[in-house]
Amino acid sequence: MSKLQEMRQAAGLTQVQLATAVGITKGVLCHYEQGTRNLDGAKVETLAKLAIACKCTIPEILEEEALGDLLEKAMKKPRR
C-alpha cells in the first residue's frame, strides 16, 4: 500500500472523492497509488491539493524516493 493510499484512507476518502477534489481522473489517482505513475512528476499544485484533501503534508504522501527526486529537481531549478 502506498503512502498516498494510506493517507487517503486515513482521511476517509474514496478514490473518486479524492480525484474529484484534486481535479484529476480516478485513473491517474490509481496510477499514483499503484506506483505506475510517479508522484515526483506531478505538479506542485497537484501535490498540494492531494495533501490538503488528505489533511496531511506533501512529504507524508510521497514515497522516500519520490520525495528525494522532487527535492533534487527543485534544487536544480534556477531562481527567478
Image: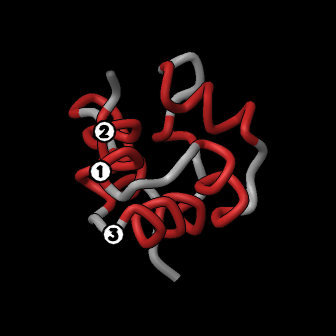
Give the alpha-carbon distance from disc 3 to disc 1, as whole Å: 9 Å
Q: In the image, what residue type sits under mark 1? A: Ala
* Residue 36 position within the rendered picture, expressed as x and y whole percent measured from the top left: 57, 16
Q: At numbered mark 2, what does the secondary structure look like: helix, strand or loop? A: helix
Viewer-proximal residue among 65 and 51: 51
Viewer-proximal residue among 62 and 26: 26
Mark 3–mark 2 contact, CB under 8 Å? Answer: no
* Residue 68 position within the rendered picture, expressed as x and y whole percent measured from the top left: 26, 39
Pointer 3: what residue? 55
Q: In the image, what residue type sits under mark 3? A: Lys
* Residue 35 position within the rendered picture, expressed as x and y whole percent measured from the top left: 48, 20
Q: How crowded is mark 1: few (under 14 residues within 10 Å), some or many (20 or more)?
A: few
State whether residue 31 is above or below residue 63: above
State whether residue 80 is above or below residue 19: below
Q: Quadrant of the N terminus?
A: top left
State whether residue 75 is above or below residue 29: below
Question: Looking at the image, which residue is at 40% across and 53% down?
Answer: 76
Question: Looking at the image, which residue is at 60% across and 42% down?
Answer: 15
Pointer 1: what residue? 10
Viewer-proximal residue among 67 and 26: 26
Q: At numbered mark 3, what does the secondary structure look like: helix, strand or loop? A: loop
Pointer 2: what residue? 6
Give the alpha-carbon distance from disc 3 to disc 2, as whole Å: 12 Å
Mark 1–mark 2 contact, CB under 8 Å? Answer: yes
